[in-house]
Structures are given as C-alpha cells and as structure tokens.
Amino acid sequence: MNRLKLFCLTASITILLLMGGCATLPTDFERIETHAYTDTGDTRCGKAGQTEKLAHPGQSGFLLLGNGLDAFVARALLA
C-alpha cells in the first residue's frame, strides 16, 4: 500500500510539472513604452566615465567569459 501512495504522488507531481511546462505566456497585456537617454555626456555619471571611454576607443564595458568556472568566480567576487 505504501508503494501505491508513493507511485500516485510521483505520478501527480509529474503530471503537474508537464502541464506547467506546456503553459504559454499571455500576449494580450499592455506594454509600457520605454525610452533610452542618448545624450548623457553632461550628466555626473557621463562626466565620470568620459576619461575611461576616451582611453579605450571602440571598446565596450563587457567581457565575455569562456567557461562556467570563470563566470562563477566573477559572480562570487562581485558578491
């Protein structure tokens, strides 16, 4: 009898997980219009980063990490 209860519980959880995995996100919700600031050179943050930007022309502030261990170490150091 104990095995039957365990089987029913496992089957119920599996069915619920499968039903949740097949769910879709709604598409009929209102989206808020957003904008990005383009001229930020005269702001405090823009002035603070201007020297770094001029020192590294054509480069961005992103560094792609090659493997998961490097990514984990970077996150751990940032935490």
Image: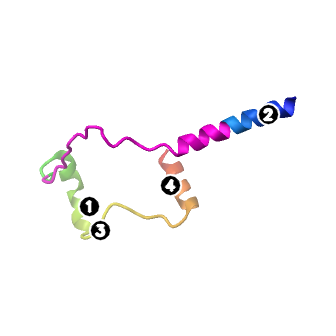
Quarter in which the N terminus is drawn? top right
In the picture shown, does residue 45 fall above or below 62? above
Secondary structure beneath label 4 = helix
Residue 56: % across, % down: 27, 68
Magenta-span inclusion, residue 23 = yes
Residue 45: % across, % down: 22, 48
The residue range painted magenta reads: 13-39
Circles 3 and 1: CB atoms closer than 8 Å:
no
Please tell me which residue is depicted at 30% across the width and 64% down the height of the picture. Answer: 60
Residue 31 versus residue 41: which sits nearer the camera? 31
Q: Earlier in the sequence, mark 3 or mark 1?
A: 1
Secondary structure beneath label 2 = helix
Identified by mark 2, the residue type is: Leu
Pair 2/1: label in front: 2
Identified by mark 1, the residue type is: Glu
Identified by mark 4, the residue type is: Ala
Q: Which mark is residue 52?
A: 1
Please tell me which residue is depicted at 24% across the width and 55% down the height of the picture. Answer: 49
Task: Report the Cα–Cα distance between label 3 and label 2.
Answer: 57 Å
Q: Residue 20 lies in what quarter of the image? A: top right
Q: Which mark is residue 74?
A: 4
Pair 3/2: label in front: 2
Please tell me which residue is depicted at 75% across the width and 34% down the height of the picture. Answer: 8
Task: Report the Cα–Cα distance between label 3 and label 1.
Answer: 10 Å
Residue 68 versus residue 51: which sits nearer the camera? 68
Please tell me which residue is depicted at 26% across the width and 61% down the height of the picture. Answer: 52
Secondary structure beneath label 3 = loop
Residue 32: % across, % down: 23, 39
Q: Which mark is residue 6?
A: 2
